[in-house]
Amino acid sequence: MNTKLLTLLVIIGLGSFSTLYAQKSFSGGTGGSWSLATNWTPSGVPAATDDVTIPNNKNVTVDIAAVCKSFTISGGNNSNAITIGDKSLTVTGAVTINAPTTGATKTKTISISTGSLCFNCNSKHYLTDSTFFHYNNFYRNNHSDW
């Protein structure tokens, strides 16, 4: 097989592999809005195929109908606040909220006003100690049960 053709096939294969496992981390460099592409690493608002991580000490305002494949709030010695006002966050896979560092008096908070947090109940969901939810519209499997 031609070496150039083999190289091209490997590059295409690696490119396809990386898009299957897309990850977005919130950097919050230009404020706390989910909708700003520059707030994410790599740049771009998360899509339904992206695994989203909110690092320790980052606060996010969900200001669009946001979607992602999985959603993780990192642990650590600082607080995180995820605010969902009148918009929604839909996660098709796992939601993991890690506790603050042992001994820290910080919290990992998701606050929902008139919007909603919806995630797929066929996946594993983890809530750890020191996680606090404010909720009016929390949906699991399209039911408003907690």
Image (cartoon, helix red, strand yellow):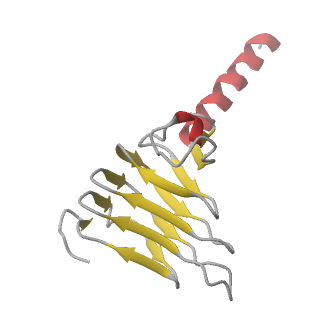
**Residue placed at 62% from the left, 84% from the top?**
105
Side of 137 relative to 103 (left or right): left
Side of 33 relative to 117 (left or right): right
Q: Quadrant of residue 44?
A: top right
| Observer-nearest of 132 and 32 | 32
Res 5 visible: yes
Q: Quadrant of residue 122?
A: bottom left
In the displayed orientation, state which residue is furthest to the right.
3
| Observer-nearest of 74 and 49 | 74
Say how many tags the image has. 0
Res 2 visible: no
Q: Residue 25: where, in percent of width, then height?
A: 61, 49
**Residue placed at 67% from the left, 72% from the top?**
76
Side of 19 relative to 114 (left or right): right
Q: Quadrant of residue 137?
A: bottom left
* Picture quarter with the N terminus: top right
User: As displayed, is residue 61 above or below residue 74?
Assistant: above
Q: Residue 18: where, in percent of width, then height?
A: 62, 37
In the displayed orientation, state which residue is furthest to the bottom.
103
Q: Residue 33: where, in percent of width, then height?
A: 48, 45
* Picture quarter with the C terminus: bottom left
User: As displayed, is residue 138 above or below residue 146?
Assistant: above
In the displayed orientation, state which residue is furthest to the front.
31
**Residue placed at 44% from the left, 52% from the top?**
61
| Observer-nearest of 129 and 113 | 113
**Residue placed at 18% from the left, 70% from the top?**
144
User: As displayed, is residue 28 above or below residue 53?
Assistant: above
Q: Residue 56: where, in percent of width, then height?
A: 64, 64
